């Protein structure tokens, strides 16, 4: 299962939108979401969390989550194990921002791994012509526009 994620924030902090596009065999998955008064980094994390929740429901094999967020990629592939070992403190000993979401993401990842699935995260450049990443971006933009018109 491969799932592309993206999100956007109208203001930072502001209203958040996230988008997921995925392929599971021949089936395609599309989803969008909303949260008020949050940040872009939280939105990027929430999009990946929603992707892993979807994978828990539908995956029957390995899972790859594709993001255009350097923050998500760095956090999940490099920083999170160090944060855990340091009691959720950064190198400078300050509390990890968005700890609640990082912990949820890590828990979902481990649950999938506990079922025998490999979970991989890959970053692509945003706005670089990657079809499903561009589709996620359009979905986020559409959801933001709908939210501005009063629909969620």
Image (cartoon, helix red, strand yellow):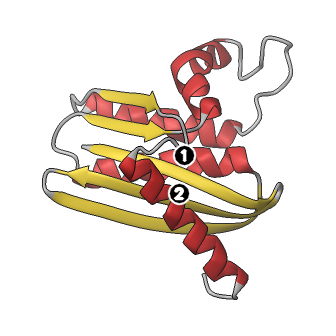
User: Residue at 60% of width from left, 21% of height from top?
Assistant: 80
Per the image, label 2 sits on a secondary structure element best described as: helix
> In this image, 12 relative to 33: left or right?
right
Total label count?
2
Disc 2 to disc 1: CB gap under 8 Å:
yes
Callout 2 crowding tier (Cα within 10 Å): few <14, some 14–19, many ≥20? many
Q: Position of residue 96 (x, y in %)?
A: 76, 28
- Please name which of the two marks, 2 or 1, marks the residue nearer to the observer: 1
Q: Earlier in the sequence, mark 2 or mark 1?
A: 1
Name the residue rendered at 16%, 43% in the picture: 60
The residue nearer to you, when weighing 95 against 132, is: 132
Judging from the image, what secondary structure is the residue with disc 1 in? loop
Q: How far, Cα to Cα, is label 2 from label 1? A: 8 Å
Which quadrant of the figure has residue 86?
A: top right
Up-down relation of residue 50 to residue 35 (above or below): above
Identify which residue, 68 or 39, lies in the foreground.
68
For disc 2, the marked residue is 137
Q: Nearer the viewer, residue 112 or 46?
A: 46
Crowd tier of the residue under label 1, counting other residues whose Cα lies within 10 Å: few below 14, some 14–19, many 20 or above: few
Instruction: Give the percent coordinates (x, y) of residue 53.
Output: 39, 51
Q: Residue furthest bottom?
A: 150
Percent of width and height locating residue 1: 24, 43
Q: Quadrant of residue 148?
A: bottom right
Q: Is residue 108 visible?
A: no
Q: Is residue 145 above or below residue 87?
A: below
Identified at 56% across, 64% down, the residue is 140
* Residue plotted at (50% across, 32% down): 106
Give the numbered dot on residue 127: 1
Q: Which mark is residue 4?
A: none
Residue 91 as seen in the image, left or right of residue 110: right
Above or below 100: residue 50: below
The quadrant of the picture occupied by the C terminus is bottom right
């Amino acid at each position: 299962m491969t799932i592309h994620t993206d999100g956007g924030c109208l203001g930072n902090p502001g209203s958040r939108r996230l988008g997921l596009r995925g392929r599971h065999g021949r089936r395609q998955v599309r989803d969008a979401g909303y949260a008020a008064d949050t940040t872009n980094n939280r939105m990027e994390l929430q999009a990946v969390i929603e992707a892993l929740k979807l994978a828990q429901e539908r995956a029957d094999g390995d899972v790859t989550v594709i993001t255009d967020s350097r923050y998500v990629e760095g956090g999940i592939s490099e920083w999170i194990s160090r944060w855990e070992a340091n009691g959720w403190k950064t190198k400078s000993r300050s509390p990890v921002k968005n700890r609640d979401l990082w912990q949820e993401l890590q828990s979902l990842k481990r649950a999938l791994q506990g079922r025998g699935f490999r979970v991989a995260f890959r970053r692509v450049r945003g706005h670089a012509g990657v079809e499903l990443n561009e589709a996620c971006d359009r979905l986020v933009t559409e959801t933001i526009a709908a939210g501005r018109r009063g629909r969620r």
